[in-house]
Structures are given as structure tokens and as C-alpha cells.
Amino acid sequence: MLLYQAIGISLVALLGYSNPVFAYSQLDRPIVTGALVGIVMGDIPMGCMIGASLELIYIGSAAIGGALPPDYCAGGVMAAAFAISTGTGIEGAVALSLPISTLVSLVKNILYTFARGWCLHQSDKYAEEGNLHGIEIMHWIAAYVAWIPLAVICGLAFYFGSGLIADVLAMIPDWV
């Protein structure tokens, strides 16, 4: 069951990261990903409540210039999944979301810098040759070379980390 949930979480994350393909329809927002994770985890009401609560945290997050905000897609997906699986609910999701989204944002920045940088240079080469098809292919590769690894990371982190996260959350005092 855990394996299927991890695969489902990866697919929810991939859908969220693929948001630009769907005309920026906000599929990456926690209010959407929380509900989808609720479906995957079998607790739709809790997924919706967690997603709505996390949306309040990330509602003003936007990439400005070269600065990347915390990755609210991964933060929403992972926090909802861990909170539902550990039974900590909204409190657990809020405690987990920002550290997860900040860590994933660092990984995302590395992927964007190196993998997308390579694609950009390939696109320049194709532009000099007048190869429009090559530029188009580089565009799609640049997108999915970051999205697929991030989605897989979400699934693997859930699969291997749910026990660890439960232990960490149990150590946090109630007053926090």
C-alpha cells in the first residue's frame, strides 16, 4: 500500500510541477495538491483541510526576478502526505511544510542551474543552425528534466521517510 501511495504522491507532484503546460491553472498550489494527496491517501477531507491551511502560508509566494520562493508544490504535497500518514493533521503539516519546501527549493535551484543551463546552450546552438524543432525539443527537455526528478524525490521521500518523519514529529513538544 505504501508503494502505491508513494507512486500516487509522485504523480500528484508531477502534475503540480507540470502546471505551466496547463496554462498556469494553479495545479501546483497547496489547496489543489492537498486535495489530490487526500485522494491518494484515502482521506479527502483531511487533505482538503491541510491544503487550505497550507495555502494560507504560501498565498503570497511568487518568484520575483531570479529569486525562487520556497517550493510550495513539494511543501504542499509532502506535508499533506506525511501529516495524513502520521495522523498529525494540520498541525503536523504546518510544522513540516516550510522546511520541506525550502530544502526542495535548493534542489530545484541546482536542477534549474545545471540541467536547464545545458538545455539553454543547446537551444542557442540550434538557433544558430536555424533548427526550430531542436529548440522546441530543448524546451520540453528543460521542463521535464527538472519536474520529473522533483516528483520522484517527493515519492521516494514519502516512501523512505514516513517513519522518520513520524519520529521527528513525536519529539516536538505539544506547546510548539
Image (cartoon, helix red, strand yellow):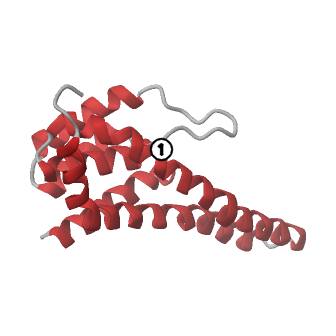
Q: Residue at x 46, y 61 (%)?
A: 150
Residue 44, how many percent across, how many down? Answer: 12, 45
Residue name at image x 16 percent, y 30 percent: 174
- Specify whether residue 36 is in view: no
Which amino acid type is shown beneath numbered disc 1? Answer: Thr
Which residue is drawn at the image coordinates 40% and 51% (left, top)? 16
Is residue 30 rendered to the left or right of residue 82? right
Where residue 166 appears, as percent x and y from the top left, is 19, 52
Closer-to-camera residue (94/25): 94
Q: Position of residue 117 (x, y in %)?
A: 73, 62
Whether residue 20 is visible:
yes
Q: Residue 160's x, y, as percent? A: 28, 67
| 176 lies left or right of 71 | left
> Is 5 drawn above or below residue 170 in the view shown?
below
Going by the image, does 154 lie left or right of 162? right
Which class describes the residues within 10 Å of circle 1: few (<14), some (14-19), or many (20+)?
A: some
Quick one: quadrant of the C terminus?
A: top left
Q: Residue at x 59, y 41 (%)?
A: 68
Q: Residue furthest right?
A: 128
Labels in figure, total: 1
* The quarter of the displayed image where residue 6 is located: bottom left
Q: Quadrant of the N terminus?
A: bottom left
Identify the secondary structure beneath mark 1.
helix
Instruction: Using the image, determine if residue 4 lies above or below residue 75.
Output: below
Q: Give the image quarter of residue 10.
A: bottom left
Q: Nearest the camera: 127 or 101?
A: 101
Circle 1 residue: 102
